[in-house]
Amino acid sequence: MVDKPRYIAVEGPIGVGKTTLAELLAEHLGAELVREQPEDNPFLGAFYKDPRRHAMSTQLFFLLQRYQQQGELAQGNLFARGGLVADYLFAKDRLFAALTLSNDELALYQRIYDMLRPRVATPDLVIYLKATTPVLLERIRRRGRAVEKPIRAEYLDEVVRTYSEFFYRYDEGPVLIVDASELDFVSNGQHRDELLEVIARTRSGINHWSRR
């Protein structure tokens, strides 16, 4: 149990709004924002078109990119005034590896991950945003990023399932599981205030919140 989270990670499948919430939360708390940078991964577009062929290169790039960011956090940013809010959890990297890599590739990936993981800080609170596949597809379509056009419902179904299995059993710290399918914390002030209030009082265990 923590008094007040110094390091909060926001997670969830593509299109769910994790970066938007991380930005909102960082502004609300006066915290430093740490953003994932998928646009810097030169293999990502090819991966969405042909996951089997480009999975390993995509995964290793993300793993090393995130590790470098986390190393910078460990050098003092964790004590920044207002704390830190990240729009990803380092441990989730393994989820996509298990989802996309062959057995031999996964074994190699796991050896690299196991060497890096002990040097990475664990968040004081994880916020997991979940949503249904149709909602995610619609949000992805609306934002219109060319690199995401090849994403299919079958792939998202697997991502949603894998995320749920992971976060419903997460035991490295407090988790707040938020149903974001009918939540608009961007343009609806009431939704936003309710969510921020729930986040502020989450201190331990696995917690669930929905407006339904």
Image (spheres, helix red, strand yellow):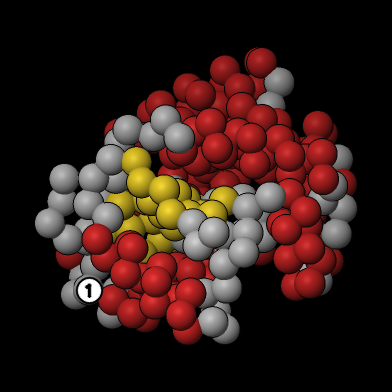
The residue at the point 36 percent across, 46 percent down is 207
Residue 46 visible at all = no
Q: Residue sitting at 63 percent across and 59 percent down?
A: 181
Rendering quarter of residue 103: top right
Towards the viewer: 164 or 144 = 164
Residue at x 78% of width, y 63% of height: 138
x%, y% of residue 88? 47, 54
Question: Is residue 161 depicted above or below 183 in this figure?
Answer: above
Mark 1 residue type: Gly
| SS for dot 1 | loop
Determine whether 149 is above or below 205 in the image: below
Location of residue 5 by image quarter: bottom left
Along the line of sight, which residue is nearer the eye, 3 or 149? Answer: 3
Is residue 3 depicted above or below 171 in this figure?
Answer: below
Q: What residue is shown at x 28% (from left), y 40% (from top)?
A: 205
Q: Is residue 109 left or right of residue 56?
A: left
Q: Tell me if I can see residue 13 in this picture.
A: yes
Image quadrant for the C terminus? bottom right
**Relative side of 38 to 8, left or right:** right
Q: Residue furthest front?
A: 212
In this rendering, is residue 93 above or below 128? Answer: above
Q: Observer-nearest residue: 51 or 119?
A: 51
Which quarter shows the N terminus?
A: top left
Q: Percent x, y for residue 185?
A: 52, 74
Total residue callouts: 1
Residue at which label 1 appears: 82
Q: Quadrant of residue 139?
A: bottom right
Apparent side of residue 106 relative to residue 4 in the rendered image (left or right): right
Q: How crowded is mark 1: few (under 14 residues within 10 Å), some or many (20 or more)?
A: some
Q: Where is residue 33 in the image (x, y as percent from the top left)?
A: 39, 70
* 191 on left or right of 153: left
